[in-house]
Amino acid sequence: MAHSPTMTMVFIALLAQTTLCFSKITNGGYLYPQFYDRSCPQVTNIVRTIVAQAIAQDPSMAASLFRLHFHDCFVRFGYDASILLDNGGTRNVISEKGSIPNSNSARGFEVIDQIKAALETVCPQTVSCADILALAARDSTVLSGGPSWEVPVGRRDSLGASLRGSNHNIPAPNNTFQTILTKFKIQGLDLVDLVALSGSHTIGNARCTSFKQRLYGNTGNEHTDQLFAAQMRVNCPQSGGDQNLFFLDNVTPMKFDNEYYKNLIDSKGVLSSDQILFKENQESMQIVTEYAANQDMFFQQFAKSMVKMGNISPLTGFRGQIRKTCKNINN
């Protein structure tokens, strides 16, 4: 049957739109938002409901769940839920939970376990822990007032963890600007992604030990508002108090907005890794200025960068597995 030119053009347009729903990944597979539409249509509602309950009980949980997603993406072979594994098990895993970036700070594991248990009841061994992390990070952002985005799913879970990768690949609060940018570029992320994703620090806390060197050392302190630094020293003494918590954004600490960037312009970034975005690179300074002036611009790029980060070499097809529990590899 012959097709008219008009019908052909409509088909091409629809095909182009459909392609945008898929996220191509390096191992030849695809992630797409509709992956569980038939196998587990309840997944989105279950994740959102449990995340909402957790944040209602503890608003700081939003930042913690987001942080799990971020720390997982930068380790091992990409985004594969390796951060959720406990020590031991059938493959004698050495957990990433004990790494320098995660020890005494990574939290929210019980929320992920609760989501997984609920999904196993209705959709046994169907939804991966990696996808749960991605969905929970999105919902945490939205429930805190931030942007929403369609989460491409279809990931599978890792068969191991990497303590070394967690210690070396995750950007640290005291890293130089170039070191942080290099760690992002290794993962296929660029300067725009770095500045946009750093905006997640509009919610959450930092431990005193993460920025103490700025308050009492000879480097980094010159980039900090001195009255702000004096206020932080009250509860972050030179000796002791390492686990004391400070809001990363003390203006609107529980609201996902662009106040973080305004703080950087005012030299009130808590972490050195935050403040250097407005002090050591002209291009990043320009982006910070734009996001401080235009929250919609920040939100749009944040959503794009989140999808991009979630596509860092995930396992698909027959690679990896769908864990029965997120903390253990299947026997």
Image (tube, helix red, strand yellow):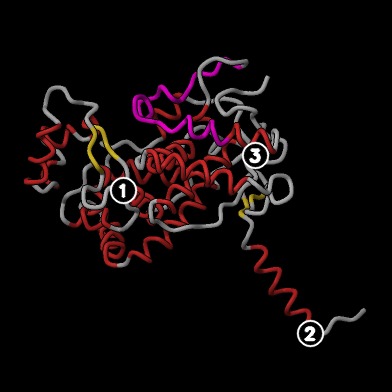
Where residue 310 appears, as percent x and y from the top left, is: 52, 46
Q: What stretch is highlighted in magenta?
A: 91-115
Q: Which mark is residue 127?
A: 3
- Badges 2 and 1: C-beta atoms under 8 Å apart? no
User: SS of the residue at dot 1?
Assistant: loop
Q: Is residue 239 above or below residue 205?
A: above
Q: Is residue 28 above or below residue 61?
A: below
Q: Is residue 318 magenta?
A: no
- Which amino acid type is shown beneath numbered disc 2? Pro
- Which amino acid type is shown beneath numbered disc 1? Met
Which is more foreground, mark 2 or mark 1? 1
Where residue 18 appears, as percent x and y from the top left, is: 67, 64
Q: Is residue 293 above or below residue 270?
A: below
User: SS of the residue at dot 2?
Assistant: helix
Residue on which disc 1 sits: 254
Q: Mark 1 or 3 closer to N-term?
A: 3
Where residue 203 appears, as percent x and y from the top left, is: 32, 47
Residue on which disc 2 sits: 5
Tell me what residue is drawn at x 49 percent, y 40 percent.
73
Tell me what residue is drawn at x 7 percent, y 40 percent.
230
User: SS of the residue at dot 3?
Assistant: loop
In this rendered view, identify the residue nearer to me: 59 or 187: 59
Q: Is residue 47 left or right of residue 28?
A: left
